[in-house]
Amino acid sequence: MKVVILGGHGFLGTMLAQRLLQKNCLMDRNNTSQAIDELVLVDQMPPQISVEGATSLIGDITDPGFLKTVIDEDVTSIFHLAAVVSAAAEADFDLGMRVNLEATRNVLECCRNLPRPPWLVFSSSLAVFGNAPAVVMDDTPALPLSSYGTQKVIGEYLSCEYTRKGFVDARCLRLPTITIRPGKPNKAASSFISSILREPLQGLEAICPVTRDMNLWVQSPPTVIENLIHAHDTPASAWDEGPRILNLPGLSVSVDEMVAALKRAGGDTSLIRWQTDSEIARLVGSWPGAMNTARATQMGFKGDDIIDDIIRDYLDFYAQQTQPA
């Protein structure tokens, strides 16, 4: 099998690549385990971490010519993680449309031209919902209130249409907010959700732009990686029983509950600066704070149990990253 990860040099892309190389197999159309013969990581930026055993390609997926050299006739599986994140897509409409929508259409067109339809795991987002009800159900309509959410939901519909036409075998996952991401804050509207835990655990200040009572739907990095792989390996027959779009299981937790868990983990909660940002609060506040993900659970997808475990996992990860060579 030849596997391509778009957005492969990012945090999740790198983590997914490492896990795939560890497994060294994915399921084929006959639900039989097959070895991964080639793993290709594609991004517009050079990798920060070299993944031994994978090939890295640097290029722009909004360029159809470049994309055709990546998604060639040997490709069997694609994980599409590349995106302009939420607040950045809101601030730069044209950039968001090029990367989040036009590039996704380019990916689907490349799949359409292959001799055999590949698997496509498309990472969508809970941002497809706007002013969501207290608990989002599997059949709650996606009514986004952001450019990012709109671009993602259109990507979902296009993936479903290309699947209906037999051009690709797509599986779309609406990811919860991934917490805790290592590194530094980025331009995602949800970046603070990791920051208010990560920075105080390292003795650094963090800014929280929303109120303490805001509920969030989160998932840990290790769990989302396993869910991405499970999406690929689940037989097509399971997806054919409903739309090729899933709300993923997650953990519903308030900002205040996160801060309490931070304190239990030994973090200095006084390092959190409460500075309301009305635009961030509007964007994140329009997303679901809780979901009933019965279909995904029935299909074997997983969530996390408690926020304390997510913090503990991050502390273990951080300890490994900071150990002397």
Image: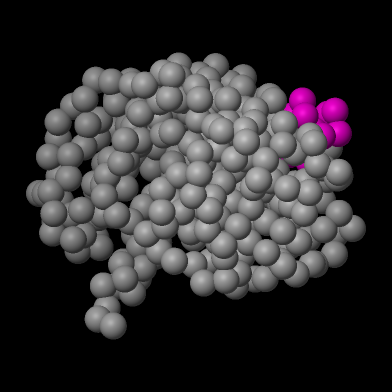
Q: Of 44 and 247, which appears nearest the observer?
A: 44
Left or right of residue 253: residue 74: right
Residue 286 vertical placement versus 3 (above, below): above
Q: Residue at x 40, y 64 (%)?
A: 49
- Residue 156, can we see it? no
| Residue stretch in magenta | 160-171
Q: Of 253 and 107, which appears nearest the observer?
A: 107
Q: Of 92 and 181, which appears nearest the observer?
A: 92
Find residue 24 and report its image quarter.
bottom right
Left or right of residue 273: residue 238: right
Query: What residue occupies the far left of the structure in this picture?
Result: 270
Name the image quarter holding the C terminus.
Answer: bottom left
Residue 32 screen position, x and y as percent? 85, 64
Query: What residue occupies the far bottom of the structure in this picture?
Result: 325
Q: Of 207 and 216, which appears nearest the observer?
A: 207
Left or right of residue 179: residue 203: left
- Residue 74, can we see it? yes
Q: Is residue 168 magenta?
A: yes
Colour theme: one colour
Residue 175 screen position, x and y as percent? 53, 41
Residue 42 screen position, x and y as percent? 54, 50
Q: Residue at x 48, y 59 (%)?
A: 14
Residue 19 screen position, x and y as percent? 57, 66
Residue 77 vertical placement versus 168 (above, below): below
Left or right of residue 152: residue 78: right
Q: How many marks?
A: 0
Residue 285 vertical placement versus 38 (above, below): above
Q: Is residue 32 magenta?
A: no
Q: Residue at x 45, y 25 (%)?
A: 96
